[in-house]
Image: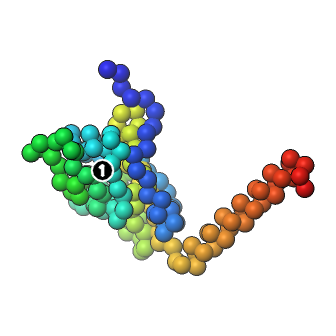
Amino acid sequence: MPREQGRKVVASNRKARHDYAILDTYEAGMVLTGTEVKSLRLGRSSLVDAFGHENNGEIFLHGMHIPEYTQGTWTNHEPRRVRKLLLKRDEIAKLMGKLRDDGVTLVPLSVYFNNGYAKVELGLAKGKKAYDKRQDLASRDAQREINKAMGRRSKGMD
């Protein structure tokens, strides 16, 4: 059977981009059990309240929910277990240096399959204040209005 090609998104954390300013992104593999992979392939996963944490020079993902595989047996996995992330040594060192800064955290942005391998996109994030969120919404609305006006003008309606 041929290996999957392309990228298939399983779950995305849209609220993370709303609540945090993403400074940098990283792609990491995950250490998973067989039933976790089967459950992910069915598109079942949640990144709500998930975060990355450094422990003894390794990066772990806490709080990610992968529900139990329905056809699994006694070998089924625990839904909210801590999962080790697979990153290169220099990426981990760079991340640990940036995570020591005040107010910076590691947030998962999406979980996907890339050429058959389960990956997680991590964002180095800094929390937004309420006025930052309002400012982002206002600028997005203004950009949408500009695009509408440009579209109408290009069609000769204006």
Q: Out of 5 and 87, give the one closest to the viewer.
A: 5
| Horizontal and vertical percent position of residue 24 | 49, 57
* Residue 51 appears in the figure: no
- Indicate the amino acid at tag 1: Leu
Residue, far top: 1
- From the image, which quarter does the N terminus lie in? top left
- What residue is rendered at 89% in x and 52% in y? 157
Colouring style: rainbow
Q: Is residue 122 above or below residue 141?
A: above
Instruction: Label 1: state its secondary structure.
Output: strand
Q: Residue at x 62, y 69 (%)?
A: 137
Q: How many marks?
A: 1
Residue 47's place in the image compared with 71, above or below, is below
Q: Which residue is mark 1?
A: 85
Instruction: Kindly indicate the quadrant of the structure image that contains residue 32.
Output: top left
On the rendered structure, is 132 left or right of 146? left
Quadrant of the rendered image containing residue 47:
bottom left
Left/right placement of residue 63 relative to residue 77 reads: right
Residue 9 can be seen in this image = yes
Residue 90 in the figure: left or right of residue 125: left
Residue 96 is situated, as x and y percent measured from the top left of the image, at 36, 61
User: Height in image: 149 above or below 134?
Assistant: above
Name the residue nearer the viewer: 109 or 77.
77
Q: Residues within 10 Å of mark 1 (few under 14, many from 20)?
A: many
Q: Position of residue 126 (x, y in %)?
A: 47, 69
Which residue is painted at 42% across and 69% down in the image? 104
- Seen at 27% across and 44% down, the residue is 39
- Locate the C terminus and report the quarter of the image it occupies: bottom right
How far from the left and from the top, in percent, is residue 100?
Answer: 37, 69
